[in-house]
Image (cartoon, rainbow, N blue to C red):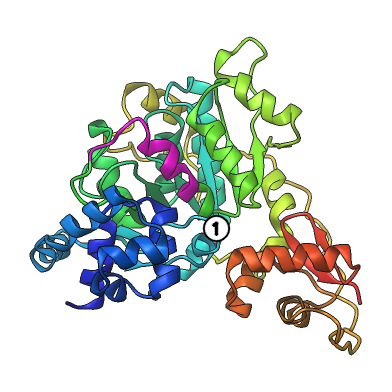
Amino acid sequence: MNETEAWYILACAQLGARAALRLLEVFQHPQAILDATPREWTAQAHLTASGCERLLQAANRNAEGELARLARLGIQVIGLHQAGYPVRLRAIADPPVVLFVKGALLPADEQAIAIVGSRHASPYGRHVAAELAAELSRRGFTVVSGMALGADGAAHEGCLRSAGRTIAVLGSGIDVIYPPEHTGLYERIAAAGAVVSEMPPGAPPTRSSFPVRNRIISGLALGVVVVEAPEKSGALITASLALEQGREVFAVPGSVNSVQSRGSHKLLRDGAKLVESVDDILEEIALQIPLAPRAINPQTGPNWDMMATTFEESTSQPAPEPAPAPVQRRKSTPKPPPLPPAPEPPVAVAPALPPEEAAILALLSTTTKHVDALIEESQLPPAQVNAALLMLELKGFAQRRPGNVYIRLR
């Protein structure tokens, strides 16, 4: 059995992220998990009896044959510890242990923004989702969403029509297209970006699978933009998960008479950043972007009036070509370049600090560094890094800045 087969079997057991992560923490590698006995799974990783049964059943699958079928469909299997797994997603508290990917995940996709909203979005909501996605893609960002009807589909469409990259996160198996109306959109996203899922092939969508997949949408992104959301909606779940993960949360205002915007307005009352243009998003996440956005050839934007009409009919049909006449857009006033950081004085690690805190402090400087970078550089578990940062703040060695970035104070 090779490494990919072992990861595949672990995914097919559908243990839940936390149970699978406990097994990996104890046994270090999926092959070592499969070599252990149910008694060891239970005693060392506290796996339940039903979890043991599912893992045993998954181990009896024809993994080699099923992986060959996925390869023919152009679907990759990427384990948590393997190259190609998204760095930002790996750093959340409960990352999926395996990602099934149709298309390609690129290092540049770490610079991503998620756009989510109601499945019953109004023409205004779909229009705004598409316009924001198009402009983000022109600025060099990957757009992440859930490929649902309404705002999600509009965001993917807007990005694709601007020749940008987009990632769709499914609440079903990677080979189960839901909703079926988005079959054409699924293929176009896979060709221009990636479709991903943590669920094994053939798994149908369920009521509980969508809230679980939302943590992946927010986990892949620097921030989440909620375009339109009723008071109880999956978009608000995604926003809540984003806050838990230390991501930025944005909301687009709607009509005071719109039921579809009540959830968005609640987010604004609770402190979400109000979005009227892409510049509002970029201003908030500027400290999280280590380099300038990757370049994309500037293009004339879509005709948004035509797009809004098209979305009324169906987002699954091939999109009409944008109108040749350029769309006049208000240009934002360019901001002066930031001042160069002050030279970093030589500092020594305080000898009295515990090893984890000393290691994190050594990675900090007087220029900001995102928590994801600290996790990657220190090779420590995310929980240990966050705990060390909290203690360093309390002791006056470090300071948290907006965007989940930190600087060294002394």
**Could you tell me which quadrant the N terminus lies in?**
bottom left
In the image, the segment drawn in magenta is 204-217
Q: Measuring from the top left, give residue 152's x and y in whole percent.
A: 43, 36
Can residue 326 be seen at all in this image of the molecule?
no
Q: Quadrant of residue 346?
A: bottom right
Residue nearer the viewer, 169 or 322: 169
Can residue 140 be seen at all in this image of the molecule?
yes
Q: Secondary structure at mark 1?
A: loop
Q: Main secondary structure of the magenta part?
A: helix
Q: Which residue is mark 1?
A: 92
Residue nearer the viewer, 54 or 209: 54
- Whether 328 is drawn above or below 99: the answer is above
Q: Is residue 392 left or right of residue 266?
A: right
Q: Measuring from the top left, give residue 243's x and y in whole percent.
A: 64, 45
> Looking at the image, which residue is at 63% across and 40% down?
329
> Looking at the image, which residue is at 22% across and 33% down?
180
Q: Is residue 350 left or right of residue 270?
A: right
Identify residue type, mark 1.
Ile
Q: Residues within 10 Å of mark 1 (few under 14, many from 20)?
A: many
Q: Is residue 397 left or right of residue 137?
A: right
> Looking at the image, which residue is at 36% across and 38% down?
209
Q: Is residue 259 magenta?
A: no
Residue at the farthest top position: 257
